[in-house]
Amino acid sequence: MAEFVPVDPFDLVIFGGTGDLAQRKLLPALFHRDGDGQFSDDSRIVAVSRGDIDSEAYRNWVRETLESQLSARELKDEVWQRFAARLHHVGLDMQADTGWGDLGAALDEDKKRARVFYLATAPSLFGTVAQQLQDASLTDARSRIVLEKPVGHDFDSARDINDAVGAVFAESQIYRIDHYLGKETVQNVLALRFGNSLFEPLWARGAVDHVQITVAENLGVGQRFDFYNRTGALRDMVQNHMLQLLCMVAMEPPASMHHDDIRNEKIKVLRALKPITLDVVDRVTVRGRYTAGIVDGEPVPGYREEGDDPEINTAEQDTETFVAIKAEIDNWRWNGTPFYLRTGKRMARKLSEIVFQFKPVPHSIFGDQPLTPNRLVLSLQPEEGVQLTLMTKEPGPGGFRMRSLPLNLNFPDAFSVTYPDAYERLLMEVLRGNPALFMRRDEIETAWSWIDRIIDSWHTRGVRTHEYMAGSWGPTDSFVLLDRDDRRWAQPE
């Protein structure tokens, strides 16, 4: 039985407190943690937005938001009364010099209380808000700042943001969030590898044939069309989520669970990534864009039809909604072992998983019976769990017949306590002052350097998107990517 450990008193300030992220993720996550008794009675949540509403009106809005996000069983009245009492709202234009005194008046003066500023805003405002907080004398050694992704759109912009925020906050006070690092299965990679002697000797090029990392979504870009048309899948998903997953499964054993020991090993993986250059980019990467199709039995429009602006829809900009990459890590552990990454919108189903495909047995003693190589699957969503496939004999008379069967560890079935969303874990880690699950500056900038090389090569070589039907597993060329190496994508059951 997991035990919920309360956190020390805090003031949590959410910039963008009425925005989409606050509605969908932050407020429900905080409500769940409050429901499990992790917050002290005097801890407070202060929302900042440009809206001209008082705290009571904000509480009413939050109640409506939670009713739309949570079930009636989850929205217990006694929890709501406690949660509502800690909610406050401050109207503020983050780019204006006035109004910051009102925010200061809403915060506690207790020097021992954690003060967390969560920037659920556009990245262009990160540096501005940090400077305004300093000018209003709202920052000190107890302060922490949380930056939502994306931190920039390339190396130069990421460096500028890091410089601006770093001029106010020390690196130890900056929490760059990637919600995939809060998922239980991602955390369990550390336990599987370094808590069991079984896996570590096999976690290398000698036993692993290749690794696949898939992050598929069945939704389209929807209301994010304008943002997505400027960004694309490579910047939106690979630079942060997928490279972080790659680092977690490929890194060397850290000296301890200390946050810098873990992040030091992750940065080594990023620095060892083989650059994708002009001469190979069209062979080791695939760009795709979905067209109209059928998802979950319903017809859906293509990417171009989802935007509201006809000029954008007909523009020559060739934005990818799917990307597949064959990545290689030039180090002793993984040299020669490919890591295949793929992510896309409007795929056949929502799925995030990491697949370790082990090498086949060197010699079969079972005649012409096919032997399926072992496979370790770490499932991140829709359900979290671990599956290991093994060859076994089918029971009964009639000969020696082999069959591949899975050993399953399903987290919801195995444990009585679950975290419904990764943001719950990450918010608790911020409030505790533990940066282990967050990205350090050098990780962000090194990842952008690798991504920028791919983008530049795409533009120089004129690599275009390949269309794929919504509801499929991506363009045909993504399958050719593995066919060249005589491998196949591990299609989910």
Image (cartoon, rainbow, N blue to C red):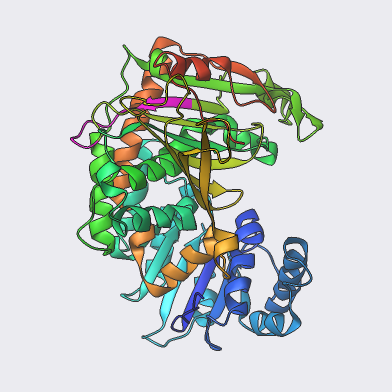
- Residue at image position (46%, 67%) is 117
x%, y% of residue 359?
A: 35, 30
Q: Is residue 486 left or right of residue 100?
A: left
Front in this rendered view, residue 286 or 337: 337
Residue 258: within the magenta?
no
Name the quadrant containing residue 304.
top right
What is the span of residues highlighted in magenta in the rendered image? 324-333
**Does residue 212 appear anywhere in the picture?**
yes
Seen at 37% across and 24% down, the residue is: 454
Specify whether 479 is left or right of 21: left
| Magenta portion: prevailing SS class | loop
Q: Is residue 159 visible?
A: no
Q: Nearer the viewer, residue 190 or 431?
A: 190
> In the rendering, at what x and y percent does residue 243 appear?
39, 40
Give the image location of residue 51, x and y in percent: 68, 64
Which sits in the foreground, 73 or 163?
A: 73
Q: Quadrant of the C terminus?
A: top right
- Queried whether the magenta region covers residue 330, the answer comes back as yes
Which quarter of the picture shows residue 472? top right
Q: Is residue 3 above or below residue 328?
A: below
Say above or below: 390 vs 190.
above
Q: Quadrant of residue 291?
A: top right
Is 207 left, or right, of 217 in this rendering? Answer: left
Q: Position of residue 469 (x, y in %)?
A: 68, 21
The image shows residue 3, relative to residue 131, as above or below, that is: below
